[in-house]
Every structure is written in C-alpha cells, then in structure tokens.
Image: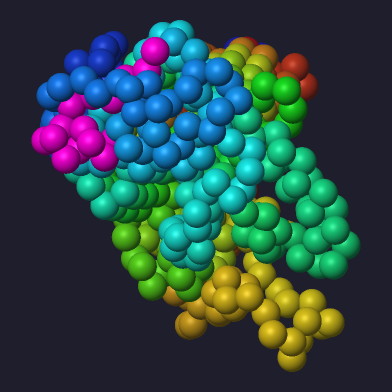
Amino acid sequence: MSLDFKGLIVWIAAIATLTGCTTQSSAEQIPSFSWIESDHKVDFSWVKDVGAKQFPEGNVFKANSFGAVNDSTHLSTKAIQEAIDACHEAGGGTVSFDPGYYVTGALFIKEGVNLEISEGATLLASTDIDDYPEFKSRVAGIEMMWPSAVLNVMDTKNAAISGKGQIDCRGKVFWDKYWEMRKEYETEGLRWIVDYDCKRVRGILISNSSNVSLKDFTLMRTGFWGIQVLYSQYCTVDGLKIDNNIGGHGPSTDGIDIDSSSYILVENCTIDCNDDNICLKAGRDADGLRVNRPTEYVVIRNCVAHKGGGLMTCGSETSGGIRNILAYNLKAYGTSTAMRLKSAMNRGGVIENIYMSNVIADDVKNLLVADLNWHPTYSYSKLPEKYIGQKIPEHWQVMLTPVEPKEKGYPHFKNVYMANVTATNVDQFISTSGKDETLQLENFGLYNMDIEAQKAGKIVFTENFTLKDIRLKTTENDQVELTNNSQLTAQILYK
C-alpha cells in the first residue's frame, strides 16, 4: 500500500503499540492515563490536597459605614481599607458593599477577611499610578520594585475575595502607555526590557500567602496580568470571569498566572485576554535560578479559554521548574494554543509530569506547541552599545546577568501527556522541537484525538515520542513532518 493513500494508518518506528484506556471524568473523577506505557510512573495522590482549606468567617463590616462612597467619582481607598483593617482586628469576617460603583486604589486584604463584592457592586480601579505604592515583587520572572495590584493578599493566610460583582481595573491607560514605550524601545534595541520599564498595575496579587480563595466575581481590563499567585500555597481560584479585551488591545494581560506556587486549584473559570489564559511560571534566567522555587501540584479543570495566548501555558519562565500539573475538562475557543510549553536557552529548569485530558478546541492556532527557544527578541537581554559604561537601572543589571555555566540555562521538557481531544478549525496540529540531538524533548505522549486542521505540523529532535489513535484531517493534505527523532511511534489515521 502507498503511504500517500488516504485512510492509511501510518506506523513509524518499530515500537510496540501502546495499550490502555481512558475514562470520562468530572470535577471529582480524575481522567485515566493508563494508556501510557513507559518507565514513567503516573502519580496523582497529591490531587486531593490542592486548594484552600479555610474560608473566612465572622461578622459583616459594611465598607459604606466607614465612608466608602458608591458614586463612581469619590476615591474610597482609605474607607475600604479601614473596613478591612477593622474586620481583621475583630478576628475576621466579611467586608461588603452596597450596590454601586466604588473608585479605589490599592487595597490590602488581611488575615481572616473576605472582601465580598456582591452582585450590583463594582470596584473601579483608579487610573492614577500614584494610588499604587511600589514594593519589591516578582514580575515576568525577576524580582524588582513594582506597583501594587488593585487587590493585594500579601504575607497572610485565610483570606478571600468573593461575590458576583465586578472589579473593573480600567487598564487602558497602562495599555496605551506600553504601546507608546514599545515603539520607542524597539528602535533603541531595548525590546527585552520594555515590559519591565513600563510598570503596569496587576489586577490581583496573592503573594507569600496560604489558604486564599478567589470566587465568583468578574475581573476586567487589568493593566497588566489579571491574577498572579506568587510564592503561595493552598489557593483556590473558582468561578471567575476574566475579560481583558474590553475597549482595546490589552498587551500581556494574562488571565491567571501561577508563579512558583504549589497546591493550587483553578476551576470553573472563563478567560478572554490578550496573552496566556492560564499560565504556570517559575522565574527567569539568573534571578529565577537564584530563587529556585518550582510551581508544582496544580489542578486546572472545567475552564473555558477564549482569545488569548494559550489555554494552558508552561513558561516561558521555567527556571525553578514546573511539575505535576493536571488539567482536564477544558474548552478552547479562539485562543492561540491548547497546550504550550515555552522557554529559552538561558532559563534553565525542567517542565515535567504535565497531564491534559478531555479537551474541546475550536478556532485555535495550534493544538500542542513545545519550544525550547521561544521568542528570541524578548528572551535574550543585550545592552546596546550606546548604553555601555552608563549607569543603568538595577533591574536592567539583573536581566543582563549571565547564566554560568551556560548549560545551567538549558531547559528540559519531559513526561508530557495529552489525551481525549476533539479539535476543529485548527491552523496547525502540532509544533514540537528540541534543540538538537543533545537536548531533546523526552517522553511525550498523545492519545485519542480527532483533529481537523489546515496543516499537520512537525515533530523534531525528540526521544520517546508516541502518538496513538490520532485521527487527523488537514486542508493541505499533508502529514506531520518527522525529523531527527529517537524511538518515535506514530499511529495516525490521515483522513
């Protein structure tokens, strides 16, 4: 039979076909990955431990009683903060609002406090950067001085933000600032630092905290990332609607970023943004390797991604490692990629034990992307000649610090599995590539997929890459390009 004959099942490499089955899952039932046949051991014993274990309880404190004004013009930061502080000092409880629009700068949620933004109440973020005091934080992989978020949960435990109301971060002023700076910086050879020099306000920051819950509200138009969970553990993000594409093109407006944190649960969220929808991060380059804190033990389930950079992305900040991630029961409509793994040759770290199952995708650019050398104009820092010998900002120096020896900066991707996928109107099925024979993608497995795509894509420089029960129909009638792979098994029905 001819390899070009339609309907042919293509077998590549003399490796035994994988066996096993999968089961449909719900939020309570973990998908089966019994189809994996390798030395890799699947262990989901940690899944039961993810998420917040406490939720604040106690009396109700009305922010209006402390002077908060719901007229959409009066700055109520001081009054709302006083209500939060009083609730905390009383042993905890709920801070609530009458219906209306409340203008606020940075707020700091304390231990035992649930900031409840009920239906009919909207927090309007101040557009004045002076209403967001700076402190040392980590942003886009390095620690530096940065403006506070609109809502901050820092160095605390047992705290929450909840309710059916809205948080409108009114971030367009920061988007416009960024686009203007970007034009100037690119002409100066400074694309690598503009994101750091343009200090933009995040929506919500959870930092160095535990047992924190974010539940049910709508977050919109964040100046920078929507939600960042940083250096924290046992947190839940449940039932949120995040919309960062209202009234403009919000650059780098990630939906949810889990950053060097552990035992995190993200569920029942709908995200429309202009960068990664849900992203797992762990620091970048020399500074990330110095901190060396992983993101691990994360469950993502029952979420929907619309426009964005990827339903689930690992990286590009990989220095501390990203591992033990389970994602299932997901939908992607119009986002760039269902699963994206990305890093650079100065990041270091290992992405491993990544599991995704039960995915419906439509109008996405790629189903799976894995790239060890992502976005070079952003990923590598080089000081233009005109700045050599001049005094430069501290965070420039951090970004310019070389990783030595250079091999310490090489990232590694291994044990990545994706199963039970139905995808239509896809630009490209797959794009996965290691660096060369010495730095390959290791132990990837794809199982039980129905894909309709414009083109097939490529698999390059991998070791032990398996595709089983893949049904692929492409407009261009092409096949997956397979180059420089070791122990490759591909069972693909080209339709």
Magenta span contains residue 194: no
Magenta span contains residue 85: yes
Q: Position of residue 338 (x, y in %)?
A: 53, 28
Q: Is residue 190 above or below residue 368?
A: below
In the displayed image of the protein, which residue is found farthest to the right?
A: 187
Q: Nearer the viewer, residue 289 or 118?
A: 118
Q: Nearer the viewer, residue 202 or 370?
A: 202
Q: Is residue 28 above or below residue 443?
A: above
Q: Position of residue 40 (x, y in %)?
A: 25, 45
- The magenta region covers 84-98
Residue at image coords 13%, 24%: 58
Q: In the rendered view of the protein, which quadrant contains the C terminus?
A: top right
Residue at image coords 58%, 36%: 126
Left or right: 376 as drawn, with respect to 96: right
In this figure, what is the number of numbered marks?
0
Residue at image coords 37%, 21%: 64
Residue 59 visible, this orientation: yes
Q: Is residue 185 above or below residue 160?
A: below
Q: How is the image coloured?
A: rainbow
Q: Is residue 180 above or below residue 27?
A: below
Q: Position of residue 103 (x, y in %)?
A: 54, 29
In the displayed image of the protein, which residue is found farthest to the bottom?
A: 389
Left or right: 389 as drawn, with respect to 218: right
Q: In the rendered view of the protein, which quadrant contains the N terminus?
A: top right
Residue 210 visible, this orientation: no
Q: Nearer the viewer, residue 3 or 448?
A: 448
Q: Nearer the viewer, residue 469 or 287?
A: 287
Quarter-of-image position of residue 198 = bottom right
Residue at image coords 13%, 35%: 90
Quarter-of-image position of residue 456 = top right
Q: Position of residue 82 (x, y in %)?
A: 32, 37
